[in-house]
Structure formats: structure tokens, C-alpha cells
Image (tube, grey):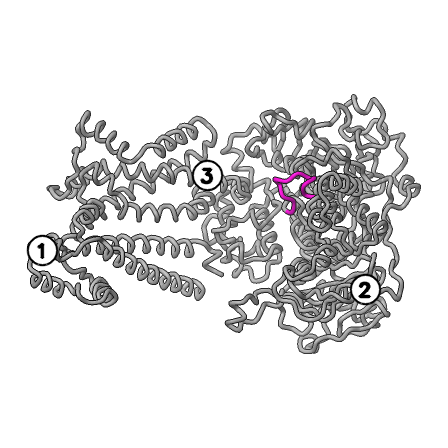
């Protein structure tokens, strides 16, 4: 397809890291080309060597890394063998970087404008300070930052995550580079912000025609933005193909599994046999194909014979010598049984809800001193009502800062200020603090945290971690406890060899299983799951999700599932509540919330979620749909961002609940008919207007 | 800017409160020194009338809290009364010593800050290479040597073996400013070593952390030259936490250098405080203790204010 000369070419690259007293190979025989004006996506799970590749493209060897062989050719020079002074002329000038986390990548003590000016002056791209200042403001305008002059004089901490990322993108664009390396540029951002940044990148690309090297673990994002994709596994490239080909005909078994593992909003059920098995264990990799231990089609030869990328179609290469024998992706998909299917409501109509919340208000800051000073608490969540039924999952979704986690903390009695009504099993008051709760309530409500690295005590063995609730709630110790712990380990599908391990000997997914086992040890009736999947890789995520569904059907536990990932929610929840700035704006059964009529905010979230399907066209979002303001002073908190705002009524009068069905309600001034997108010409028009 | 002014005002207010509390403690501590001051000053043979007159003159017959207030109101105006031993006014007695101490302190501080920053920076930039290891070893040796050993060693090398500097640093006899500088050099170097060994290690660790940070990596990958990365992105962020130690060191220089002063026979505040304690000269003790705590507290106050001003996060709220 591409007969032009590559812009940059990685040739047979080997990278090693110094780990525990020896050099460990992290990238092996990597060769790839990026052509002018194309967007090359590099996907893979954490630890596969994506960021190391990004460093190589900039000729950068971080501490403890070395390029043992290979070259990176750019403009006739090998970047890996360039002198520092020559490299400085390339970096930021011809090849620039947009790093993963803009919050930590901006210098905290320097105004953001000056950080861009610095690049321009350093590369003598602008001749004077004033010229550089003008260009910086112009760049800020190009990346759609509102009031660029004001932004120029801000410090990084004064900007939101989205604004920071725009500043970093402006910095990358500063000297009109030929290649921009983007290392997970939207990973820490909310879906809506992510959609805006993706939009911006597409616009910039069509205007300036620079090449992009886009690194991400998110298949949805690559599908939406890249023209060609490389899939990486354990430091090797296993498949390269144009985007459409890759998603239509993934050839390598790893790519197939990866694509099948991604939850989709449009197709919530998932096929079991395609999900990736096991995890990547770096130390036990075979000399041959590194994916062989996890592969369904591996033969003896796979373990010993190293794989090369071979042509499997036009512009399509895969590193699997058995590729022709592996059934096509679509066939495998059709044949395999369904692993996770969003079940319809498990509860019977006359079931009593396990948690019933009415007009709950949650806030912080009202401690004794402040009550004495008659200070009012800061209200985070206001007037929310919902029920959780036995054996069901209620998901709360929303952007960061919407108050999801606060709700979970309040139900656990961890927030200082709770007003309104919250009942557990119809009898127990949940508005009281954790230290005043009965043993029974403490036991039956358990919490699993987002980050298992931080929630497991690193100095305790797995056995100690899991047996602690047993001793506390059931007075089970000694041999009996050991048995119970082993059974719990089995329940989360870990074998007994984990019994004596420490958390840092485990992978992220294994740790999250331990956290789940610890919660299960208390035999809870309600599990509060706070973003439990967000720190995990897709394939691990799929497995943990499957585990949660299985445990629910076996034990009849209820979940309050907090997530920002709509696709995950779609595949696990029975009921969904959409939170915005601490208030509920839509509540209903999962199939009701994911189908029209939508609350305008739900609509926005759904449109912003990138689907792993290049044919699924993401609507062009407004370049600035604003940011979540945590305490908007409008009656409808969403009014300032709403594309279909009725008028002043939205700012002054609290919107009523529009009742769509017995279980489905939407809080909006628009009627249900008006909220149905297809039947409302006006709505579509307004959406269009807001785009232009 | 409002927040900054508010924060600074509250810090100043707290500092004044602290100083008051300290002054009470100092006064009380000097009071509990054993023995009748009148008897001590006038001698055992003094008549009861003479003692009584003495007590009245010094307000010793009044209740403690009244005496405290009288003392405090004097101290605020800079009048600490008279030394018991010499009967001269305190400002006359303490003044020249304070000047000497401040001279030595500034000298040492001017040496200390750049040396610390320089050594820490080259150490961090050459992390785990021979240069870093050498500096690390040297600072470790410095840390484990008591200051009088360092002082004595310096005297041995630079005053006895190679008589470049005088053995004794009697600055009061200095003929000119530069003569005073020459006399003070060895004690200043001793103090610099004492302070720098710890600070270099701390600043090196801070710098290493900052050099590993995302924003330093970003600055490098923007194509900035190494010196610019270090001076504009790494150092400013690594220095702020080190400021506190530096401020404490400044305070140490004023109040706690008794041993070094003794080694070099330097006429400073520390030596004077020790002398006053031997003589049970309460007014002198009180005056010096109050001065030293004033300097201690202000040094801390200034670093606080400086770190507020240098941190955009605190500055802009």
C-alpha cells in the first residue's frame, strides 16, 4: 500500500532494562515504519513495551534502560546514536511528545505559557520573546483553549485535566513537527474530555498533516483515530494492519482475544472462549512465540520457534505461523458461548430492596469545630433517591467529580455529613457513621476499592489479608480459617499457591481478586465496587467482570457498581443511575437507560464513548462542551453544558422527573417526546448547531 | 493575593504568640535558678538593708507576673536592664557579641548555600557514579565527625601546619574588615561543613526524585539543553523543601554554635551565654535566650512566607 519513504523507521530494535541485578529484554526485534501524515496506533496491555517504544522514537533512554541493538532512522540519522546536542535539535522541533499524564508533565512552578515559549525560543522557532508569546497564544487558540491570553499566565494546577492536555498538545505542535508521539494522551481523562481531545487531534491532523504515533491500551480510541495499527505483546509486534482490516479480520490469536475482550456499549454480551486466558508472566516466557502459553492453538513448535511477522493479506502482517489454520475471527465469535450477558432483572417485583435511599444529601466539612462556628458543610451529593434489590447490580455512572464515590463512602458510613433517608434491609439506618454501626451491618456491607495496590497492606500475606474479616466477624481462626481462605481463593479462581504470597508478588488482576476475596470473606449482602476495573488491563478486566457476574449468580450478592465506563456498566448492571454534579439525572433499568429517550447528559456520555469499531462513527462533539462544574448554581446542574437547554427555566427551576416507565425516570424540563432524538427535529438541529 | 496576605498574617500572629510563650518560659526558667540573687551579687556579708535596697531597685520584691511584665515591656523597647555581674547595661554587654555572631553566621551562610546546591546538584546528576559516591562518602564522614574535631583539624592543617589563618579568632582585635574575615574563615568553614553535610544529602535526594519526575523528562524531550532542564525545571522544585533545613541552620548559627566558638575562642553569643549561666547572671541569660528564640522564630517565619510565595499552588489558592 505504502510505497513512499517512511518518515521514521525502527529497525530490529532490542531494548533491555536493568532489573534485579541483570539486564532483562523488554523489546525484542521490533521493526516498524511510520509514514508521513499517517496515524499509527500501537496497542497492547500494560508492560508490553509501548512506552519504551515511544522513548525510542525520541532517542531517549531512561535510567536503567539500554538499547542493546537496532536503529531508529529519521532523516538519515540513527536517533539512538546521535550526540545529545544533535538530539536536542530533533526533540520538540521535528519529533514531539504528548505524554500520558499532563498533570505531572507540566512543570509545577512555571506558567504554562512560558513552558511553550521556552520550546519556541530554544529551537529558535520564534525570534523574540514577544513573537514566541504571540505564537503560543495562537497555538492555544488552535487547540481550542478558551481565552488563551488568560491561560498563558496560569500555573498548571489552575487548569483542568482537559485544559492541561490541550496545553501539552499545543506545546507538541509548537515548532510544526513532522511526527507527534502520543503516549496514552487521554487515559486519565473523562470520556467527554477524551472525545474532545480525539476530535481536536483529528482536526489538527487534517489541517497540518503531521504524522502521529498513537500509543494506547484502549482499542476504542485506536479504532476511532488511527489509520494503521500495530499490536504488541510482551515486547514483540504480533500484528500490523490497516485499522479496518485489523478490526474486521484480526489474525493473531492475541489480537482476536484482545478485541473480543473489550466491552461494547452496542453489543453487551461477550463470548467466553475468545476471552484471553491467564496473564502475561514475563519470567516464564518460552523462547518461541511468547503468546503460546495463553494460546488455544499453540502446538509444540510454537513454544520453541520464534515467530516473524509474515504477510497474511494486503498490508497486513501477523507473527503467527499457524495463522491460516486459525478459524476466522467472525467464525470463532459466532461459535463461542456467551460468557457475560446482561441479565434481566433478577429481582421479583415484590422483593424488598436491600438498600433504599430517599432524598439523600451528602457533604463534607461539618466537623465539630465547624458546626460550632456554624459553618455549613460542603454538599457533594444532593437529593438522590434509588433502590438496590437483592441479587442485583445498580451502577452509578458519571464523570470524575460527579459524586459517585461519595455515594459509596456514605453508604459505608465514611462521610461526615449525611442527611435524608438511607435504609438497609428496610430496618437499619445507613446515615449513621461507621463507628456507630452494628457488627451485623459492618459485615454485610463490604467495599472494594479502585486500586488494589493501595488497598492491600503490602506487609501482610494474602492469607492474613483474607482471614482478617473471618476472625473479626465469625471468630474463625486457625485451621478452620485456613480452609475458608483456601475456599475463598478458589472462589476468585486463584490456586492455593497464593496463600503465602505478598501483594507485590501479584499482578494487578490477581490483587483485585484478593481484594474481592477479602470482601467475600465477610459474606456480605452488598458489595460496593468503586471503579474496581479501571486499573486493570482489558483482558484482565474481562475476567474479573466475569468473576463478579458469576459470584453474584451463585451467592445472590447485590452490587453497587461505580464506574465511568459505560460499556462495562452495560454488561454488568441491572439498574443504572446517571450522576451529574452530585444529582441523579436519569435512573432506570439498564436497557432503558441505554436506549432513547435519554437525558441529554446520558446522550453526551454515550456519544463520547469510543467503540472498538472503525465503522462506528463518533459524532463530532462540540469543541467545547465545557467541564463538570462541581457546584453549578443553576437549578439543573447540567444546564451550562446542555446542548438542548430549553431556556432560562433550566437555570431557575429544578427540572421535574419525567416518568418514562415504572422503573425509568429522567430529570429534565423537556418532555419524553422531546427527549426522543429521532422524533425531534429541533433537537437534532440544535445538536448540529452546537457542532458548528 | 488575598489568600496569601491572610496566610502570612496568620503566620505572623502565630509567630508572635510563640515568642510570647517562649519569653514566659525563659523568664520562669531564669527565676528558678537557685539562690538569692541579692546575696549572690552583694556577697554573704551584705547587710539585710543593703540586700533589701538591691531587691527594690531590681523590683525583686514584686510578684513574679509583675516583674515579667516590667521585663517584657522593657525588652520590647530593647531595654533588658543591667547585667548583674558587671552592672553594665545589657545592650552594651550583648551588643558587640551579637554583632560578632551575626558576622560569623552570615559568613558561614554565604559559604553554605552555594556549596550545598553545587555539591548536591553534581551529586544528583552523577547519581551512583564515582563522583556521587565520593561526595556521599565525604558527607558521611562529615556527619559522623563532631564539630570540635572538624574545627581542631582545620586549625591543625591551616593554622598550625600551614599558618594561613590565625589559631584564635579574636575578631575584636581585627584591624580591618578583611582582617576580621580572615580571622573568621576557619570557624565559618567549620560551621559550613557541619551544616552542609546533612543538607547536601537531603537536597541530592530531593533532586534525584525531581529528576525522575515526568516534567523533567518532558523538559528533556522538548529538546531543552541539560543545563536548562536542571536550572529551570529541576532545581527550583527541589530547593523548596530544602529551604526549611536551611532556615533552621541559620537559626543554629545564631544560637547554637557554642562549641565552635569555644574551639576558636570566638567572642560570640554562645560563649557569652555559657559564661552568663556560670555567673547566674539572669538578665543576660534572659536577653540572649530571647534574642536567639526571636531569630529562630523569624527564620522559620521567613521560610514559611518564602515557600508560600514560591509555590504557585499556595500562592494562587
Q: Chain of mark 1?
A: B
Q: Residues within 10 Å of mark 1 (few under 14, many from 20)?
A: some
Position of residue B70 relative to residue A448, above or below, is: below
Give how far across and how far down residue A149 sits, in percent: 52, 60
Spatial CA distance of label 2 from label 1 is 90 Å
Q: Which mark is residue A308?
A: none
Give how far across and how far down residue B284 sits, in percent: 19, 54
Q: Is residue A331 magenta?
A: no
Q: Secondary structure at mark 2?
A: loop
Q: Chain of mark 3?
A: B
Compared across the picture, whether A337 is left or right of B230 comes to right
Compared across the picture, whether B81 is left or right of A280 comes to left
Look at the image and give the residue range highlighted in magenta: A455-466
Q: What residue is disc 1 on? A: B42
Q: Earlier in the sequence, mark 1 or mark 3?
A: 1
Q: What residue is disc 3 on? A: B205
A434 or A381: which is nearer to us?
Answer: A434
Give how far across and how far down residue B76 sits, in percent: 23, 63
Q: Secondary structure at mark 3?
A: helix
Amino acid at each position: 500500500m505504502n510505497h513512499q519513504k517512511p518518515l521514521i523507521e525502527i529497525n530490529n530494535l532490542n531494548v533491555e532494562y536493568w532489573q534485579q541485578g541483570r539486564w532483562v529484554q523488554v523489546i525484542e526485534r521490533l521493526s516498524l515504519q511510520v509514514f508521513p501524515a499517517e496515524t499509527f496506533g500501537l496497542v497492547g496491555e500494560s508492560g508490553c513495551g509501548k512506552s519504551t517504544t515511544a522513548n525510542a522514537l525520541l532517542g531517549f533512554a531512561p535510567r536503567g534502560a539500554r538499547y542493546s541493538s537496532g536503529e531508529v532512522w529519521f532523516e538519515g540519522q540513527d536517533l539512538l546514536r546521535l550526540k545529545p546536542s544533535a538530539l536536542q535539535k530533533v526533540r520538540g522541533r521535528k519529533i514531539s511528545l504528548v505524554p500520558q499524564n499532563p498533570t505531572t508533565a507540566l512543570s509545577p512552578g512555571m506558567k504554562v505559557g512560558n513552558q511553550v515559549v521556552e520550546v519556541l525560543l530554544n529551537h529558535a522557532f520564534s525570534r523574540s520573546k514577544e513573537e514566541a508569546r504571540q505564537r503560543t497564544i495562537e497555538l492555544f487558540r488552535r487547540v481550542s483553549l478558551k481565552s488563551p491570553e488568560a491561560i498563558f499566565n496560569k500555573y498548571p494546577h489552575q487548569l483542568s485535566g482537559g485544559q492541561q492536555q490541550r496545553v501539552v498538545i499545543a506545546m507538541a505542535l509548537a515548532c510544526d513537527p513532522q511526527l507527534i508521539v502520543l503516549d496514552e494522551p487521554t487515559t486519565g481523562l473523562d470520556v467527554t474530555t477524551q472525545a474532545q481531545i480525539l476530535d481536536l487531534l483529528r482536526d489538527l491532523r487534517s489541517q497540518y498533516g503531521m504524522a502521529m504515533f498513537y500509543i494506547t491500551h484502549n482499542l476504542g480510541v485506536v479504532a476511532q483515530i488511527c489509520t494503521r495499527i500495530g499490536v504488541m505483546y510482551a515486547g514483540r509486534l504480533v500484528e500490523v494492519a490497516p485499522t479496518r482490516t485489523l478490526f474486521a479480520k484480526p489474525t493473531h490469536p492475541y489480537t482476536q482475544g484482545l478485541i473480543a475482550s473489550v466491552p461494547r456499549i452496542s453489543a453487551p454480551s461477550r463470548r467466553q472462549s475468545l476471552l484471553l486466558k491467564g496473564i502475561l508472566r514475563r519470567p516464564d516466557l518460552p523462547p518461541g512465540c511468547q503468546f503460546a502459553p495463553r494460546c488455544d492453538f499453540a502446538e509444540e513448535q510454537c513454544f520453541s520457534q520464534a515467530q516473524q511477522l509474515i504477510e497474511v493479506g494486503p498490508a497486513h502482517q501477523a507473527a503467527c505461523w499457524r495463522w491460516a489454520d486459525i478459524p476466522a475471527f467472525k467464525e470463532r465469535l459466532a461459535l463461542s458461548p456467551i460468557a457475560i450477558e446482561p441479565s434481566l432483572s433478577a429481582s421479583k417485583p415484590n422483593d424488598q430492596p436491600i438498600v433504599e435511599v430517599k432524598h439523600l444529601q451528602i457533604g463534607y466539612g461539618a466537623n465539630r469545630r465547624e458546626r460550632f462556628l456554624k459553618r455549613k458543610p460542603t454538599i457533594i451529593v444532593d437529593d438522590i433517591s434509588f433502590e438496590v434489590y437483592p441479587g442485583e447490580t445498580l451502577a452509578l455512572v458519571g464523570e470524575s467529580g460527579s459524586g459517585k464515590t461519595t455515594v459509596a463512602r456514605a453508604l459505608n458510613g465514611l462521610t461526615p455529613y449525611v442527611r435524608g433517608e438511607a435504609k438497609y434491609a428496610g430496618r437499619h439506618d445507613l446515615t449513621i457513621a461507621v463507628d456507630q454501626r452494628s457488627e451485623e451491618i459492618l459485615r454485610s456491607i463490604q467495599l472494594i476499592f479502585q486500586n488494589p495496590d493501595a488497598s492491600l497492606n503490602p506487609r501482610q500475606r494474602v492469607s492474613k489479608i483474607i482471614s482478617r474479616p473471618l476472625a473479626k466477624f465469625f471468630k474463625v481462626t486457625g485451621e478452620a480459617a485456613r480452609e475458608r481462605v483456601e475456599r475463598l481463593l478458589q472462589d476468585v479462581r486463584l490456586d492455593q499457591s497464593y496463600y503465602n504470597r505478598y501483594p507485590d508478588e501479584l499482578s494487578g488482576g490477581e490483587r483485585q481478586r484478593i481484594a474481592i476475596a477479602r470482601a467475600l470473606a465477610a459474606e456480605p449482602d452488598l458489595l460496593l465496587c468503586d471503579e474496581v476495573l479501571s486499573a486493570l488491563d482489558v483482558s484482565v478486566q474481562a475476567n474479573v467482570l466475569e468473576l463478579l457476574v458469576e459470584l453474584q449468580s451463585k451467592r445472590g450478592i447485590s452490587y453497587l457498581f461505580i464506574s465511568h465506563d459505560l460499556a462495562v456498566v452495560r454488561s454488568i448492571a441491572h439498574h443504572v443511575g446517571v450522576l451529574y454534579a452530585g444529582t441523579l439525572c436519569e435512573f432506570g433499568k439498564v436497557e432503558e437507560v441505554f436506549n432513547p429517550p435519554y437525558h441529554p447528559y446520558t446522550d453526551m456520555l454515550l456519544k463520547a464513548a469510543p467503540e472498538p469499531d472503525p465503522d462506528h462513527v463518533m459524532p463530532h462533539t462540540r469543541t467545547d462542551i465545557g467541564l463538570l462544574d462541581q457546584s453549578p448554581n443553576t437549578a439543573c446542574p447540567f444546564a451550562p453544558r446542555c446542548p438542548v437547554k430549553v431556556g432560562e427555566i433550566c437555570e431557575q427551576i429544578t427540572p421535574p422527573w419525567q416518568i418514562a416507565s415504572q422503573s425509568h425516570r429522567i430529570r429534565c424540563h423537556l418532555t419524553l417526546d422531546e427527549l426522543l432524538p429521532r422524533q425531534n427535529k429541533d433537537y437534532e438541529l440544535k445538536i448540529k448547531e452546537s457542532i458548528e | 493575593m488575598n489568600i496569601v496576605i491572610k496566610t502570612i498574617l496568620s503566620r505572623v500572629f502565630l509567630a508572635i504568640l510563640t515568642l510570647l510563650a517562649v519569653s514566659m518560659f525563659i523568664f520562669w526558667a531564669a527565676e528558678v535558678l537557685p539562690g538569692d540573687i541579692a546575696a549572690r551579687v552583694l556577697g554573704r556579708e551584705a547587710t539585710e538593708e543593703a540586700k533589701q535596697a538591691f531587691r527594690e531597685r531590681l523590683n525583686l520584691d514584686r510578684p513574679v507576673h509583675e516583674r515579667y511584665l516590667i521585663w517584657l515591656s522593657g525588652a520590647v523597647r530593647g531595654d533588658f536592664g543591667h547585667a548583674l555581674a558587671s552592672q553594665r547595661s545589657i545592650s552594651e554587654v550583648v551588643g558587640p557579641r551579637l554583632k560578632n555572631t551575626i558576622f560569623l553566621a552570615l559568613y558561614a551562610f554565604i559559604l553554605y548555600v552555594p556549596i550545598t546546591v553545587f555539591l548536591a546538584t553534581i551529586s544528583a546528576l552523577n547519581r551512583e557514579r564515582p563522583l556521587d559516591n565520593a561526595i556521599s562518602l565525604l558527607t558521611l564522614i562529615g556527619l559522623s565527625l563532631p564539630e570540635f574535631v572538624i574545627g581542631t583539624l582545620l586549625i591543625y592543617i591551616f593554622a598550625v601546619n600551614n599558618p594561613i589563618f590565625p589559631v584564635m579568632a579574636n575578631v575584636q582585635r581585627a584591624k580591618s574588615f578583611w582582617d576580621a574575615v580572615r580571622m573568621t574563615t576557619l570557624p565559618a568553614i567549620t560551621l559550613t561543613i557541619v551544616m552542609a553535610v546533612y543538607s547536601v544529602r537531603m537536597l541530592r535526594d530531593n533532586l534525584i526524585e525531581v529528576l525522575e519526575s515526568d516534567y523533567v523528562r518532558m523538559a528533556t524531550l522538548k529538546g531543552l539543553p541539560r543545563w536548562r532542564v536542571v536550572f529551570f525545571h529541576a532545581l527550583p522544585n527541589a530547593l523548596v523543601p530544602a529551604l526549611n533545613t536551611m532556615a533552621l541552620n541559620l537559626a543554629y548559627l545564631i544560637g547554637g554554635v557554642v562549641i565552635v566558638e569555644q574551639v576558636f575562642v570566638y567572642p560570640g553569643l554562645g560563649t557569652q551565654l555559657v559564661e552568663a549561666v556560670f555567673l547566674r547572671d539572669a538578665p543576660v541569660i534572659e536577653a540572649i535566650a530571647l534574642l536567639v528564640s526571636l531569630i529562630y522564630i523569624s527564620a522559620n517565619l521567613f521560610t514559611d512566607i518564602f515557600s508560600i510565595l514560591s509555590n504557585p499552588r499556595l500562592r494562587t489558592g
